[in-house]
Amino acid sequence: MSINISKIFIGYEEGKKLFNMTNIAFQEELSKAYSLKKSDLSPTFIKESYKGTDYRELYKVARDNLDYNLLLEDGSLIQLGYASNKQEQIVDLRYAYYESPSEVATYQEFLKEIGLNPTQIEECGSSFLDDYHQYISEGTLKNHVTNVRYDFSMTQYEELVHPVSHIHIGQNNEIRIPVSFIMTPSNFIAFILRHIYWEKWVQAIQYDDNFKNHYLKSYKTEPKLATELHTMEEKFDLHFSCS
C-alpha cells in the first residue's frame, strides 16, 4: 500500500499555500521542486546526518549545500523527498523541518531595524531575505531547537518496534511516534504550522475561514494504512490518526 507520486507534488503545492496563507515568507530551491526525490540531498548532508553531527553544523551543511526545498523567513529549513521502485510505487518518504539554531529577530522586525517604513515593508516582499539569512547565520545560538522528521519506509517496517509511518521529534533520540496514515507534504507542513508556528497558525485558524477550511481539508483525503502495515496490536498503541 502506498500513495501516487502525483499526490506528493500536489501536497507540495498545497503546503506552500498554507505558508502563504499564514504570511510566512520562504525561498524555494527550484532545482529540487521539480524532482522532490530523497536522492536530491547531497552526499555530504546524508553522511553528516548519520554521524550525529552537532546540530548547528548539520544545519550549516544543509544551508551551504542547498539541501532544502523551502528556506523559511526565520532561517528554518523544510526538506521533502520520496523514493520509488521500478513500478513507480512510493516505498520511502522523508520530510524534515530543521529549526534555525540562531536566536534572531523575525523578518518583519529585521526590516524595521534596517530602516524600512511600513509601506516599504509591505512592498519589499522577499527582496531582503538574503541579507536576513546572513544576519541569521551570525546570530546568537538558541538554548533549545526543535527538529521534526516524518518517515515512511516499507523496508524498515517491523510490527510495533518500527512503525512503517512515523514522526521523529528532536535530534539524536529514539522518539518515534506512529502515524496511522501516509502523510503528504501538505500534512507535514500543516503539522509544522500547528505546532511550531502556533501564533501565526492560531491567528489564521480563528479569523480566516478560508485558511481554516484549507488546513482541515489537508488531512481528510489521505488513506489509512492497510492492516498488514498497521496491525490490530499497533492500533492499541498510542499513535497519530485523522478522520
Image (spheres, rainbow, N blue to C red):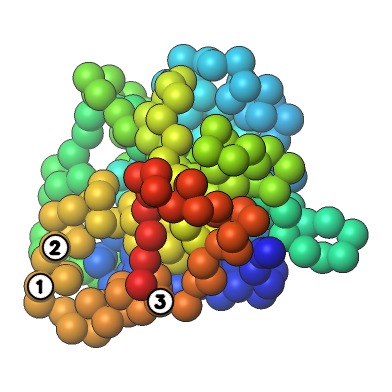
Which quarter of the figure has residue 52?
Answer: top right
**In the rendering, at what x and y percent does residue 149 appear?**
47, 41
Comes first in the chain, label 2 or label 3: 2
Type of amino acid under label 1: Gln
Q: Are marks 1 and 2 in contact (CB under 8 Å)?
A: yes
Which residue is found at the position 45% from the left and 66% from the top? 186
Q: Quadrant of residue 230?
A: bottom right
At numbered mark 3, what does the secondary structure look like: helix, strand or loop? loop
Q: Which mark is residue 220?
A: 3
**Residue matched to label 2:** 202
| Residue named by callout 1 | 206
Q: Quadrant of the N terminus?
A: bottom right
Which one is earlier in the sequence, the residue at label 3 or at label 1?
A: 1
Q: Residue at 46%, 20% (x, y): give it.
A: 172
168 versus 101 height, above or below? below
Q: Does dot 1 land on a helix, a strand or a loop?
A: helix
Q: Are marks 3 and 1 in contact (CB under 8 Å)?
A: no
| Residue 236 vs residue 189, the one in the foreground | 236
Mark 2 lies on a secondary structure that is helix
